[in-house]
Image (cartoon, rainbow, N blue to C red):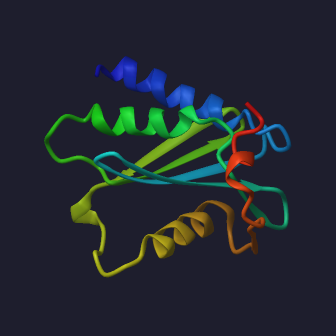
Amino acid sequence: MSADEAELLLSEIGQRLLMDIDYPSVPTLLYAQLDHNFVSESIYKDIGNQLLFRWTTDRRLPDDLLALWEAQGSGARWSEMEYLLRDGRFEVRYFYPDEIDSEEDMDVRREAALRRHFGDKPIIYPAWPPPDDIFDDL
């Protein structure tokens, strides 16, 4: 994948994050962990005095993340990423396996990313939706 194709895919990821009907343009952090045929993404919205966890509203988001991850080739691939969307612009930071403490849980790294970007705010997690309701907004 060329740099232009990767940039296009990163832009598409941003567009998918903007598809959140309730919070389309608030600062957003996507923290993702990837491996072969595995994607774990967490989306947080900065809604002022708190952060709100949001379910993925576009089923293509995990596919785009996996395509981006797979495009690295078979060499050293990043395993986690931060995607910050703010004021219509995005910043991406990749974390490679040798940069990650294997004893540290991903939840700790994700929370550190939230604090780094949004400060020390409480995080609101919604109740688990029924499985068929996650992608109803499509």
The single residue placed furthest to the left in the displayed view is 75
Residue 81, position in %: x, y?
Answer: 43, 51
In the rendered structure, the answer to whether residue 76 lies left or right of residue 13 reads: left
Residue at 44% x, 39% y: name it. Answer: 65
Residue placed most toward the observer, 60 or 14: 60
Give the image quarter of residue 60: top right
In the rendered structure, the answer to whether residue 73 lies left or right of residue 104 reads: left
Q: Quadrant of the C terminus?
A: top right
Residue at 50% x, 72% y: name it. Answer: 107
Residue at 28% x, 31% y: name it. Answer: 71
Can you say whether 1 is above or below 40 in the image?
above
Residue at 71% x, 34% y: name it. Answer: 18
Residue 79, position in %: x, y?
Answer: 32, 54
Give the image quarter of residue 124: bottom right
In the rendered structure, the answer to whether residue 137 lies left or right of residue 114 reads: right
Residue 69, position in %: x, y?
Answer: 33, 39
Can you say whether 91 is above or below 114 in the image?
above
Residue placed most toward the observer, 71 or 27: 71
Give the image quarter of residue 70: top left
Q: Quadrant of the N terminus?
A: top left
